[in-house]
Image (cartoon, helix red, strand yellow):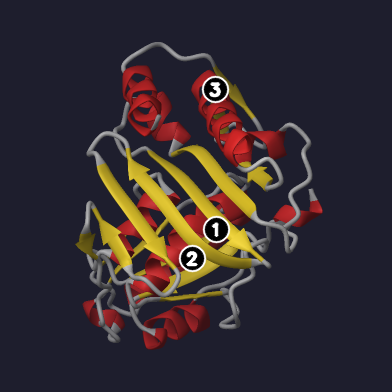
């Protein structure tokens, strides 16, 4: 099933796509997003009929996005849809699992590079069976920071977004990168290839699997206020060290998005 799923996405990358928009002109969805999501849910429902599901396209179509104590699968069928539409090969499938509102494990697959990232609470994080370890950098002047733009592109939001990048560059960060996939950016953090990540406007399906992987790789995942992560808040800071995460929390200004569980 897993190989079949990823073959679908790799094949679809090379083909013409039916593209539509959701919350903005930059928030895209394709027929592959819907097909892959339905396929994942149908297979999991057959094995776990009592479990609940939170999935990106189902939520966009009006399904409730509320995390309860029930065993819940949290699914992003194609993360990096804009990349996918343009055949830019940074595209992933992300599946997280929570029980009693506690994230238990996560799986993220980089479809074009055939990298499988996995993490299970208390059992470590891996990429293709190689154990992951975050960077232990605490100094912003030696850091590579990752972020994503988010779907809102109005002038006020763009001013805040660019202002946040300017603040980190003025703090002498080595660089700021945008790769178009929140889940894969977070996987790069878990592997030690970057030192921190922040974003406003991502969703619980972007965060669920990656949060487990980063924590199990020794990293920190918090709210942009510096407090504990709220999976439904549509904002996050992740870093290899708590010192780095807290420095970024103090530097950046908030970009407001509606919570996932308010949909």
Q: Secondary structure at mark 1?
A: helix
- Point out the frontmost of discs 3 and 1: 3
**Percent of width and height locating residue 136:** 26, 82
For disc 2, the marked residue is: 163
**Percent of width and height locating residue 222:** 53, 76
**Percent of width and height locating residue 224:** 56, 74
Q: Which quarter of the figure has residue 62?
A: top right
Depicted 166 relative to depicted 34: above or below: below
Asked whether disc 2 touches disc 1, contact meaning CB atoms under 8 Å apart, the reply is yes
Q: Is residue 203 visible?
A: no
Res 159 label: 1
For disc 3, the marked residue is: 35
- Point out the frontmost of discs 3 and 2: 3
Foreground of the two, 48 or 141: 48
Tell whether 258 sits left or right of 83.
right
Q: Residues within 10 Å of mark 3 (few under 14, many from 20)?
A: some
């Amino acid at each position: 099933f897993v190989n079949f799923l990823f073959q679908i996405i790799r094949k679809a990358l090379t083909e013409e796509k039916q593209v539509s928009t959701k919350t903005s002109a930059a928030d895209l969805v394709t027929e592959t997003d819907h097909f892959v999501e339905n396929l994942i849910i149908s297979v999991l429902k057959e094995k776990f009929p009592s479990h609940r599901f939170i999935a990106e396209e189902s939520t966009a179509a009006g399904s409730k996005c509320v995390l309860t104590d029930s065993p819940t699968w949290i699914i992003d069928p194609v993360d990096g849809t804009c990349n996918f539409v343009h055949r830019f090969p940074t595209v992933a499938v992300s599946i997280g699992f929570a029980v009693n509102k506690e994230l238990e494990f996560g799986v993220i697959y980089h479809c074009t590079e055939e990298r499988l990232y996995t993490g299970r609470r208390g059992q470590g994080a891996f990429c293709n069976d190689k154990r992951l370890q975050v960077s232990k950098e605490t100094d912003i002047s030696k850091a590579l920071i990752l972020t994503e733009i988010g779907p809102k592109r109005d002038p006020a939001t763009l001013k805040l977004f660019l202002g946040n990048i300017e603040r980190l560059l003025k703090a002498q960060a080595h660089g700021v990168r945008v790769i178009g996939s929140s889940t894969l950016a977070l996987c790069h953090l878990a592997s030690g290839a970057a030192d921190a990540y922040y974003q406003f406007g991502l969703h619980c399906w972007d965060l669920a699997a990656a949060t487990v992987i980063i924590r199990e790789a020794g990293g920190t995942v918090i709210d942009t206020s510096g407090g504990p992560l709220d999976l439904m808040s549509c904002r996050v800071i992740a870093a290899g060290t708590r010192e780095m995460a807290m420095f970024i929390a103090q530097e950046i200004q908030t970009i407001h998005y509606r919570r996932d569980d308010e949909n």
